[in-house]
Image: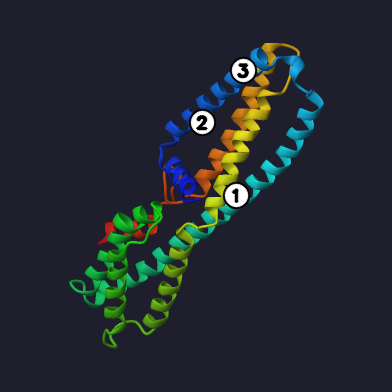
Amino acid sequence: MEMFASLARWIAEQPMAVGGTWAVMGSALAGLAGTMFVTFVIGPDGRDITLTGLKLEVLGQIFSGLLVFVLVHGAILQYDLRTLIDLEGRLLTDLHFTARRADPEGLGILVERYASMVVERELPALAGGRHDPATQGAFDDMLVTLAATPPRMASDMGETLAQLVDIRTKRLVRSLPDPLMGYAWLGVAFATATTMVFACLVAGPSLIIQAMLSTLMSLSAVTIAYLAILMNHPWSGDMSISARAIMDILRWG
């Protein structure tokens, strides 16, 4: 299912203006083309409207349940990562001020180097679904050096470092994609396509109204699926989480 997870990641990385345009135009054209195909190839007499309505109702329940799961997962993921990156930034800021007072050319540079690598290397790597060993090495160097500093450092330095390790670990674990999400995106893709197909089978009092109904139903399904993709990729695209609390360290340095 890696193909569907990679496709969802690629969609999330596109600018929202481009992605939104493709979602609207693609679903509208698909709904309109499907309506024309069903009307002129199958014909009204070849459709069982009652059976189509029952199947569409069942499909809607399945689709909505799947999308609720994906949307809730994305909302929780966004909230958790925003909280973790903010806490990490606050702890790192405290360490930075302490390090600059004690040893600006040594400890201070190590903290700034780690902050820079998080912004420039690690977050883009996480957006692509992978770790960045170089940033992990910079963090380990900073951690070991700060832990071995003489007693002139703050007395609560050990507690701050322990909290920083815990928060960073949680952020990395939450940032990497869950392998099971590949199956979820397969389900979203299949349910979206099936909903668009069934939308074309809906009959209206006229061809124009039927085309409008099919287009709107297709547009709704694609738009919700697109929103779910954006929310489940917190480090990608225009909706990505900003590491402002960590970037401030570079500005102050």
| Nearest to the observer: residue 170 or residue 116 | 170
Gap in Å between the C-alphas at discs 2 and 3?
A: 21 Å
Task: Give percent across and percent down for residue 67.
Answer: 63, 45
- Amino acid type at mark 3: Phe
Q: Residue furthest bottom?
A: 151
N-term-proximal mark, 1 vs 3:
3
Q: Is 14 situated above or below 43?
A: below
Q: Which mark is residue 23?
A: 2
- Mark 2: give few (<14), some (14-19) or many (20+) Cα within 10 Å: many
Gap in Å between the C-alphas at discs 1 and 3?
A: 32 Å
Q: Is 235 situated above or below 100?
A: above
The residue drawn where x is 38% and y is 77% is 161
Q: Residue furthest left?
A: 105
The residue pinned by badge 1 equals 70
- What secondary structure is found at the residue carrying circle 2? helix
The residue drawn where x is 41% and y is 74% is 165
